[in-house]
Amino acid sequence: MAHNTPHCSEGEGRRKGRHPSAGPAKGGSRNNFPPGKWHRLEVPSDFAAIRKVEGAIMAELTAHNYDPDCLFAVKLALEEAVVNAIRHGNRMDPSLPVCVNYDVSPERVTIRLSHCGLGFEPDNVPDPRDDENIRRPAGRGLMLMQAYMDKVVFSPRGNEITLIKYNVASPRARPSNQEEHHGNSNSSAG
Amino acid sequence: MEIQTRRQDDGWVVVLKGSADVVAADELREVLLNLLSTDTPRAVCDLSQTDFMCSDALGVLITAHLKASGAGGYLRLAAPTKRLREILETTRLTRLFAIFPDVAGALKT
């Protein structure tokens, strides 16, 4: 085993010893958890564990009457994010966990997912839609996340991703810009 | 996901029922590549009952398509659901795959 005490890197929040359930930290640092009712899951680097994560979050979204298109989008993005964390982040090491923190409100779902490995630079990922890449069997996960979520943000180290999807069925779905303080904009797409 | 295969006309029909997620992608790879390794490297994937497809499963379809093409055959897609069609368009894989409204049409073309 590569690590004696495997844990997920959760950016500044982790280093400050803050648990997501503690609520938002003051000061507005870029890795703070915004206000909300945060839940936390930690699963092993095993693809079968993805269903546990999806099941928990899908149940919350369904309870909040999210639109079927939203449910599909979140399921797809979540699958891609967890697979990437297991495969590229934790290098398929089953002893290393993937950490998922999520907050579901009637207006939006925010998912923060981190792994124990090295990050990456999203801008360096080739566009799989380009002619020279269209025949490559891999490399579409990031693009799908960006296409199906309203916001995709990576931590500066690239080992934590934040996914946001607004509930189109909610009249208050899109908050003011002031509420959107989820870190840098390494990668985002609508 | 449930995968059903049958011989029809001059090729194979592979029906994908349910969710083509990362776990199912491994099984799909094995099934498709085995079929396309036979002396009939022609297959149609019936996507009319596929409600989800992740990038790994898309990658399997691409690999199978390249294998079939290399062997002088084909892998064609038939009757994708609305969500599958959307994924194929979003990834622009509509440029790579021949997509047909139904299985019969895919086999006859």
Image (cartoon, coloured by chain):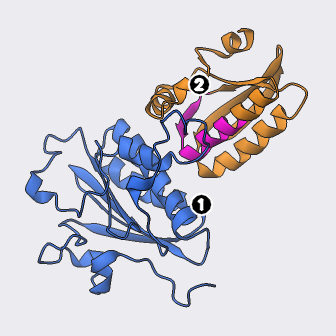
Chain colours: A blue, B orange
Q: Nearer the viewer, residue B1 or A95?
A: A95
Disc 2 element: loop
Q: How many marks?
A: 2
Q: Find residue A161 and report its horizontal and vertical position in percent.
A: 36, 62
Give the residues in magenta: B47-64
B24 relative position to A13: left or right: right
Instruction: Check residue A183 for magenta coloring.
Output: no
Q: Which residue is mark 2?
A: B48
Q: What is the x, y in percent for residue A154?
A: 34, 61
**Residue B31 x/y as whole percent:** 78, 40
Q: Residue at x 47, y 61 (%)?
A: A53
Image position of A175 (left or right of B51): left
User: Which residue is drawn at the image coordinates 82% and 13% (left, top)?
Assistant: B9
Does residue B60 belong to the magenta stretch? yes
Q: Which numbered tag is attached to residue A70?
A: none
**Residue type marked 1:** Phe
Name the foreground residue: A52 vs B104. B104
Local SS, label 1? helix
Residue name at image x 44 percent, y 33 percent:
B90
Q: Quadrant of the N terminus of chain A?
A: bottom right
Amino acid marked by disc 2: Ser
The quadrant holding residue B95 is: top right
Above or below, A35 relative to B99 = below
Q: Chain of mark 1?
A: A
In this picture, residue A126 sits left or right of residue B108: left
A6 up-or-down from B52: above or below = below
Determine the CA span between mark 2 and mark 1: 26 Å
Q: Residues within 10 Å of mark 2 (few under 14, many from 20)?
A: many
Give the residue pinned by disc 1: A47
Name of the residue lying farthest toward the front: A132
